[in-house]
Image: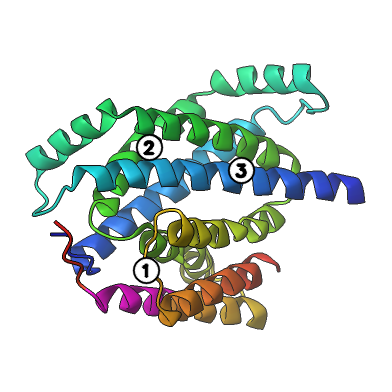
Amino acid sequence: MREGLLITLFMISLTSLCDTINQLFLKSAIDSMKFGGKFNFIRIFKFIFQLLIKPRVWLSFVFSVISLCIWLLVLSRADLNFAFSADSMHYIFIALASRFILKEKFSHLRWLGTGLIVMGIVFVSLN
Amino acid sequence: MFKKKVTLKILLLLFASDILETAIHFFFKKGALAQDGLSVVDLTSAVFFLKAIFSSPFLWAGLFTVAAVFIIWSTILSKIDLSVAVPIASFSYILVPVVSVIFLHEQISVLRWTGILFILTGVVLVSLSSKERVEQNK
């Protein structure tokens, strides 16, 4: 039982990590396009099309599929409450990756907010 | 050139992508449950398990929703930082308990209310942290 829990936890870390890599590739592809201005249907369609030509986006798909497969395995074996509370580490991964790889600027406010969300998710999920 | 302010429109898009994301979880959970009899112990059974799952209609409904979420999510990311978008999207964790109170009249424990309060505060703080600055990179 203990061992099963550890494996589940490891799998959840892995799925979070893969999803973080997926988001990194996607965000860096989008940033390289400098799509600004207003939303409208045609512009979004063009934007998505240009995005889909980028190899980085397909890399992001690969990681997203890996993440999904692991997540399906987790769901098939773990308690949902536990799975979702452990998945809150995802927010820590995203914050660190955004800060150190994408070089997004973090104020204290953003760190504090992210920390509160992580704690909140653990509280909500553990029942 | 990039205005990184979190506008109402972006919040609505995040809300939509969150609801669809929940739908994805529902579809995939349904698809996975349909294969309840199988246990995954090694690589061969894992492959067999995934094969069985990919023949489920729920999975395909899920994948269709994934495509919709991808379009919405990319649009959001073109407007704001990743470290803002992801935390704000966390309010789906509030959505489920709140919906179960309103429609299912479920009791919510003090711990859970505390968690909801934490998430809400966190989301507000992160949104504010994005409002602080308007970047000028061309």
Query: What residue span does the magenta drawing correspond to?
Result: B123-133
SS of the residue at dot 3? Answer: helix
**What residue is shown with label 3?**
A15
At label 2, which amino acid type do we have? Thr
Q: Residue at x 51, y 63 (%)?
A: B93
At label 3, which amino acid type do we have? Thr
Give the percent coordinates (x, y) of residue A119: 61, 73
Magenta span includes B125: yes
Which chain contains the residue that carries disc 2? B
Can residue A77 be seen here? The reply is yes
The majority secondary structure of the magenta stretch comes to helix
**What residue is shown with label 2?**
B65
Position of the C terminus of chain B by quadrant = bottom left
At label 1, which amino acid type do we have? Lys
SS of the residue at dot 1? Answer: loop
Q: Residue at x 45, y 62 (%)?
A: A99
Label number found at residue B74: none
Q: First in sequence: mark 1 or mark 3?
A: 3
CA gap, disc 2 and disc 1: 32 Å
Q: Give left or right: position of A100 versus A8.
A: left
Tell me the crowding category of disc 2: few under 14, some 14 to 19, or many 20 or more residues within 10 angstroms, Cα based.
some
Circle 2/circle 3 CB separation < 8 Å: no
Tell me the crowding category of disc 3: few under 14, some 14 to 19, or many 20 or more residues within 10 angstroms, Cα based.
many
Residue B62 is drawn in which quadrant?
A: top left
Q: Give left or right: position of A112 versus A104.
A: right
A66 relative to B15, above or below: above
**What residue is shown with label 1?**
A105
SS of the residue at dot 2? Answer: helix
Give the percent coordinates (x, y) of residue A68: 55, 36
Colouring chosen for the image of the structure: rainbow
